[in-house]
Amino acid sequence: MELTYKFASKSTYTFKKKVGSGGSAEVFLYSRQAEGLPNQDVVLKVLKSADESGVRELLNEGRRLGMLKHPNILTAFGYEKIDDQKFGLVLEYFPGENLKKIIPRIKIEQRPLVAEYVVKTLCEALSLAHSQEIIHGDLSGRNVLVSHQGQIKLSDFGLACRPTLQGRSVGVQIKGSADYLAPERWQGGAPSLEADIFSLGILAFEILNGENPLSGGSCSSGLSRTLQFLQSENWNRFPAWRRFFEGCLNKKPKDRIGASELLKFVPLSGFPVMEIQRYLEGMMRAENTHDRVKTETQVFSKLLSPPPSLQRWAAIFFILFLMAPGAIGQDHSSSGRLKPCLLTLTSQPWGEIVIDGVSRGYTPFINFPVPAGAHVVVWRNPLMGTVRKTLRAFENGTLAYKISKEHGRLQTVPLESFQLK
């Protein structure tokens, strides 16, 4: 169904399709022809009614976005007054999906890389907004857009505001995504820079964990659920992110640090941003699970694949390894009846893990089941080199190693004897 709104401006709008609908607004895709400019696809966010509160939020979103010029913040082009006294906000067209829908599909091995990319990008965007004392007010995975090329943009500044002197909004309905709210927001506190930082911490944990720790339950239990999560300190399962979470997931707002300082504590793997974008692009374009797994493997293997000469030597080495006494598969009578051993391998920076000639993903590599017996484990990073280790897995055993650089060369050390800085 084509919409034929009567626009007050002299720009010509051609309806293309309806993009979506929310509680107070509908979103449409138009082609806009402005005088002296080429055709441009834009999004028109139109209020369903002339409700005073909704109009105020829409006007506020346009003003705030107009003040923020950043490659990772959605651009607003202005307002349109249309028939029936409705208002529309003209926004940049950024085709893709919101991050909330993508997170459950990210493989566990790639979560640290995606988290690094997304959180670093959002820290930079928030640094600009907060430097101009603009609070987002509703930072969540739903308001982070991921394009079909894997790029990131922060959107929906409808609840954006400036810091208040009192710090509390008495009698005002709490707005914002319940599964990202800071504790003080549940207690009637107004949106703040510190509350944005807390929401960013929840989003970072959600990407690493695969699900939001504050989702589920009723709004009435929101505060207790949040406090319980903070008390559990579950983020300690991600030691590389410890200092980051300590800087943002604090009960007291004054104990949280700013976005620009928080940026220093985002773990950097050295993995090229373009490759992470290609991974997100491939994952979004895959039509089913089988295609997605195939695409992920192709995207991450291309950069790390060794030259043909090294591939030939690896094949020769693997054949010799299989011929050696005690190699995998030569003692079917015993190893076939043993239970798997759990292998953990971490490194700084990241590295690809190859077990017995088969790529198994990237560090951190946690509790991966391997059959009992001898295995050749290879860690490789194109910038730092390769580490090869032969290990023997035992029934119900656990093996944990960390790749570190000591005495000028890479080597493995037991994880329990290595303390992260």
Image (cartoon, rainbow, N blue to C red):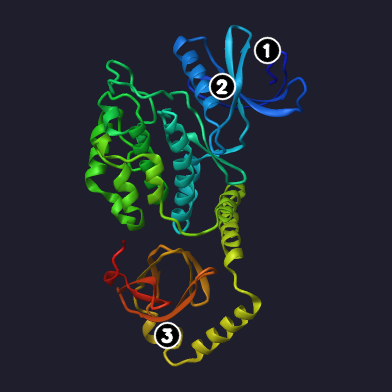
The residue where tag 1 is placed is 7
Q: Quadrant of residue 230?
A: top left
Q: Residue at x 35, y 53 (%)?
A: 241
Q: Residue at x 49, y 49 (%)?
A: 117
The residue where tag 2 is placed is 26
Q: Secondary structure at mark 1?
A: loop
Q: Secondary structure at mark 3?
A: helix
Residue 97 screen position, x and y as percent: 55, 39
**Direction bottom: furthest residue:** 325
Residue 44 screen position, x and y as percent: 61, 22
* Alpha carbons under labels 1 and 2: distance apart: 16 Å
Residue 234 screen position, x and y as percent: 28, 50
C-beta proximity under 8 Å, tags 3 and 2: no
- Mark 2 burial class by Cα count in 10 Å: few <14, some 14-19, many 20+: some
Q: Quadrant of residue 325?
A: bottom left
Where residue 101 is drawn, which disc sits there? none
The residue where tag 3 is placed is 332
The tag earlier along the polypeptide, 3 or 2, is: 2
Instruction: Decide if residue 244 is on the left or right side of residue 158.
Output: left
**The C terminus lies in which quarter of the figure?**
bottom left
Q: Residue at x 43, y 27 (%)?
A: 134
**The N terminus lies in which quarter of the figure?**
top right
* Alpha carbons under labels 3 and 1: distance apart: 77 Å
Instruction: Decide if residue 342 is on the left or right side of residue 110.
Output: left
